[in-house]
Image: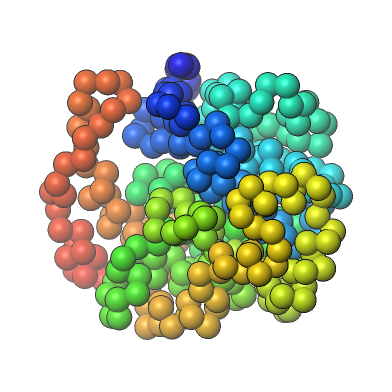
Amino acid sequence: VFYKEGIVSSVGVFKQGDIFTIKYSERTQIPAETSPAGRLRSNHRLKAHIPMVLHSNPHAVVNIGFGTGVTAYSLSLHNNIERVDNVEICAETFDAKRFFINNSDPVFDNPKVNLIVDDGRNFLFLTKRKYDVILVYPFSYVFSDTIFLFTKDFLQLCKNKLNPGGVIAVFFPITQNMLVENKIDHSKVLLKTFSEVFPHFALFSTLPLSPYIGGGASLIGTVDPGGINFSPEYLKNRFKSLSPEVKTELMISNINNAEDLLKHLILDKVSLEKIYGPIKDIVTDNRTIIDYRGARLNWSKRTGNWLQYEQLPPRVDFEKFLYLQKGK
């Protein structure tokens, strides 16, 4: 239903039933339903609302990775919000938002909502602004460019751009090996890396039923000495201060009160620390390591359609490669 070639990527929107999917020429895709109650749409919505609720009074937020625009729209609904900066490296993505956001809604004409074409990391590096909430939801780390939105160096940059008491939420891939003791896994390495910069953190599901689907979890952290406050007392008071529009979106996602929100808490800091336990590796700009492990997921071939690819078996034992490279 939509196609446009760009400098960074070619962008297409495909429709199948109630689901529209943005597809990029580098094999990534972002689906969401047109129905407000859609499960995938709820995923994008809760990526905005959960970190915003965990901050007591956010005024400025930056959203790196525009995608469908649903997350950006949800951010704009919060009370007292003064600025929402949406940074997207692929300009053509903004042209696709009409398939996911009602054209009659003036949210993107709001002067408080900014659509910025830039590399997310470059934007944060150059901007003099500071934010109360930073959202980082890039494509998978298996791509050589997005890995640099998962490194300790980038997280340190985010830390420097947060106001006191600020909160960061990043995409987190949950894997089956995550809970296997002594198993080297990229999720554990990411946890260890995140904890090096943000000492207080928790993992939340952004999907109604199961977090074990791509894009279904957010790792939320802060450097605030008080940590992340998700006590029932705080959340009950916070819910009272939410705008009617935010409450409506949360209710559509089956979150009617503080208890419902806490059902999305997968693991707290103590549990997460036990998971990554003895892991010493961290992801840095000079030693990205986990993109080598994830690269085996990226072997694919074109199957005819310009945006359709077929997965191929891994050609290299990347687990073995990591063991051989350990310590180098």
Identified at 28% across, 80% down, the residue is 182
Identified at 77% across, 76% down, the residue is 233
Give the color scheme: rainbow, by chain, secondary structure or one colour.
rainbow
Whether residue 313 appears in this view of the structure is: yes
Residue 284 % position (x, y):
45, 61
Residue 163 % position (x, y):
77, 61
Image-based side of 202 in relation to 303, left or right: right
Image-based side of 324 in relation to 190, left or right: left
Whether residue 195 appears in this view of the structure is: no
Q: Nearer the viewer, residue 37 or 308?
A: 37
Residue 224 % position (x, y):
72, 73
Residue 63 in which image quadrant: top right
Q: Nearer the viewer, residue 146 or 232?
A: 232
Identified at 72% across, 47% down, the residue is 248
Image-based side of 192 in relation to 200, left or right: left
Q: Nearer the viewer, residue 174 or 248?
A: 248
Q: Is residue 153 above or below residue 189?
A: above
Residue 212 in which image quadrant: bottom left
Q: Is residue 40 above or below residue 232?
A: above
Q: Quadrant of the C terminus?
A: bottom left
Residue 68 % position (x, y):
55, 34
Identified at 46% across, 37% down, the residue is 30
Image-based side of 33 in relation to 23, left or right: right
